[in-house]
Amino acid sequence: MIKQVVVILCLTLVFSGCDDRRVFDQYKSLPNSWNRDSVVRYKVQGLDSTAAYNLFINIRNTNQYQFSNLYLITDMSFPNGKVVKDTLEYEMAYPDGKWMGIGFTESKASKLWYKKAVQFKEPGAYTFQIRQAMRRNGEKKGIENLKGITEVGLRIEKMN
């Protein structure tokens, strides 16, 4: 157990030191489940209007997550009030049931593409909202409390 912790810490230090493209990278923890009405929000300011960025949604899940995919609804709000809404679907597990994310324990982390080559031309704060949109096949009403998603993150990387 101690050996695994040391390896994880070393890998974290190695990869975080080489992460010069990262501009924004935050996670928000969820309680025991992700309520369908619960919105994860991030406010980002000070982005270079001449640069292009790749955006990612980071998800940490445990074995309590019961699905092989994940539906999300996102809102990206511009300083002028414009909102871009997306409905996204991500595969979370292989056909054999093994999680696609990385991790040594039952918790897996997935870095999921959100938007590519985005330019933030307006000065001011941009707000990102992420909510789960999962439902069972044949049901119109969404899953009230989605279990197994422990953290939701937003990552913005400057393109080379």
Image (cartoon, rainbow, N blue to C red):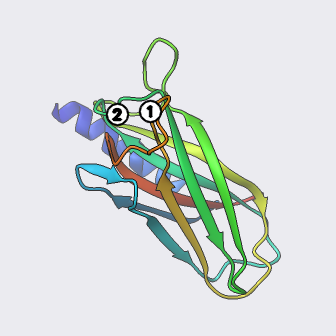
Label 1 packing within 10 angstroms: few (<14), some (14-19), many (20+): few
Q: Please state which amino acid type lies under the numbered disc 1.
A: Arg
State how far apart marks 2 and 1 are (Cα).
13 Å
Instruction: Please name the residue that numbered disc 1 is placed on.
Output: 136
Q: Which mark is residue 26?
A: none
**Residue most extreme to the right:** 50
Question: x, y percentage for residue 6?
Answer: 26, 39
**Residue most extreme to the left:** 1
Residue occupying image coordinates x 46% and y 39%: 135
Question: x, y percentage for residue 151?
Answer: 36, 52
Left or right: 43 as drawn, with respect to 32: right
Numbered-mark total? 2
Question: x, y percentage for residue 95?
Answer: 52, 14
Q: Quadrant of the N terminus?
A: top left
Q: Quadrant of the C terminus?
A: bottom right
Between marks 2 and 1 in the image, the one whose residue lies nearer the viewer:
1
Please tell me in which quadrant of the rendered image residue 10 appears.
Answer: top left
Residue occupying image coordinates x 64% and y 83%: 46
Q: Please state which amino acid type lies under the numbered disc 2.
A: Tyr
Label 2 packing within 10 angstroms: few (<14), some (14-19), many (20+): some
Instruction: Please name the residue that numbered disc 2 is placed on.
Output: 65
In the rendered image, the vertical position of residue 83 relative to residue 134, given as above or below: below
In the rendered image, the vertical position of residue 63 relative to residue 33, given as above or below: above
Residue occupying image coordinates x 46% and y 33%: 101
**Residue most extreme to the top:** 96
